[in-house]
Image (spheres, grey):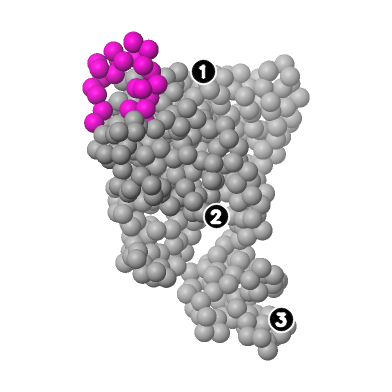
Amino acid sequence: MNTTSIPAERTLFVSKYPQQTTTEQLKKIFSEFGQIEQITSQGSGVCIIYKENQSVTSALQKSININGEEPYVCQYLNIAQLDLEANVFIDNIDKKETQSSLRQLFSQFGTILSVKLQKSDKVGVAYIQFDKKESADKCIAEQSKLGFKIQKFTSKKQHRDQVYISNIKVQPNVTPDQLKSELQTFVSSFGTVESLVLNRNTTNGTFFAFVKFVNQDSAKAAVKSNKLFNDQQIHIEWVVNNVDKDIEANLFTKNLKADITEEDLRKALNLVVPVEDIKLMPSKQPPNGSRPPTQIAYLYFKTADDGKKLIAYAYDHPQIGSLYVNGVISLSPLLPPSEVNSLLQVKKNTFQRQFHQPAYQQYQQQMPPPAYYQQQQRYPQQQPPRQHHNGNRYPQQKRPYYPQQQQIPDLPQLQVMVDRGQKQQVTDLIGMQLFPKVTQVVGPINAPQVTGILLDFENYQLSDQVRMIQDSAYLGENIRQALEILK
């Protein structure tokens, strides 16, 4: 359906409901508020069009639950007509609050167009869109009385008419002015260029450039092209606007199989969220030849929420996993080049702090009994694993050995051990099974912290931990919650 033909005054927009929810289930749930004329897909959700305007009002006044989750529900909005100055961000919201309760509380300041609530296991944040800037100003002025931290929130769009070009190599006898002239001719083949800024990377001697086109179609043509520049492969990608920190609107993915196409990737990713654009790079053979060739791709979304949703739910879809070598999915935010080094330094400092005070340090330092260790170890005891030497990024870190075929006692036996005060031994037994599974999903850097959360008896019961080992879907759900806690 064309967005211009949607009757906004009698249309609900619903998203963030469980993936398995069908259209018939949605119709049954929302028919409570009035007769439904039509349900149509719209972006990452659906539009529910009622016969009467009052049905929309009634639906917004009630807290709606779908299979244990609260979906995002609001009146359909014409984004182009919204007052961006009338949007507020609210922090430190109690996890008991709902969209309905927040709507009732903040409606004293003016007409609310939408309430978007995001919650972790402890607190939440919300985005409230008023119809007028004055309402948002009143809300901010009264924040001390309300007990919330409230501030203006203005979403910034990505620049779709600007591209970043890197890996530009130049012969010694070519001057920067000559290179700029050649590059200007090259990019002009895609469309009219408004500006071109060329810079030198002093680290490796290559050049990079920022190019602004007159229109977005020209920029898209440049990004989609694999055309050679002076007989060399250069990298062309969208410029990432990171002012609002919504970095998940642009993702980088690697480890893709060499034979997949852009259409294969788009079809699989659209099972989770709509992809605005994809840039699939040519496959490369690893230098040592010991691994199969892989591809990388740049993924672009309309919003950061879409990117976050893909990161959170990609492992739930076998069709996506089948595109990657050995099913190992790799997704990460795409940062502008100027921020990569600073981010790596922040990550390094963060990981070092986490290492010195890991979330489950006692568990990490536990080792199997010496006799058992000698029986199970795959290399002679006098020859420690390579990563304990120069290959280990953090020399002090001690990595336990996890036997692959270790049998875990059943739940009653584990409960008896806990009752006898052997809680640490139970944690070790479960951890030996859980840690490798978590590592496969989140990687070796985040695995210790995530596993530590899952092994905490204050967060999860013993029966929950055993179920995680046996049920991969249940494990994936709890891993997502643990990652939210870490964020």
Residue under pointer 1: 96
- Looking at numbered disc 3 in the image, what kind of residue is underneath it? Pro
* 416 w.r.t. 2: above or below: above
Q: Which residues are magenta?
A: 407-434
* 166 w.r.t. 395: above or below: below
Contact (Cβ within 8 Å) of mark 2 with mark 1: no
Q: How many marks?
A: 3
| 211 to the left or right of 354 | right
Q: Residue 140's x, y, as percent?
A: 73, 27
Residue 426 in magenta? yes
- Res 176 label: 3
Q: Residues within 10 Å of mark 2 (few under 14, many from 20)?
A: many
Indicate the secondary structure of the residue bearing disc 3.
helix
- Determine the image quadrant of residue 184: bottom right
| Residue 73 can be seen, yes or no | no
Residue under pointer 2: 334
Q: Residue 288's x, y, as percent?
A: 39, 69
Q: Residue 418's x, y, as percent?
A: 34, 14
Q: Residue 19's x, y, as percent?
A: 35, 37
Reading the chain from its start, which is encountered first: label 1 or label 3? 1
Task: Spot the residue most to the bottom.
Answer: 173
**What residue do we see at 43% from left, 58% from top?**
254
**What residue do we see at 39% from left, 50% from top?**
383
**What residue do we see at 66% from left, 20% from top?**
108
- Looking at numbered disc 2 in the image, what kind of residue is underneath it? Leu
Reading the chain from its start, which is encountered first: label 2 or label 1? 1
Contact (Cβ within 8 Å) of mark 3 with mark 2: no
**What residue do we see at 60% from left, 46% from top?**
348
User: Disc 3 and disc 2: Cα gap in Å?
Assistant: 28 Å
Task: Spot the residue most to the top.
Answer: 419
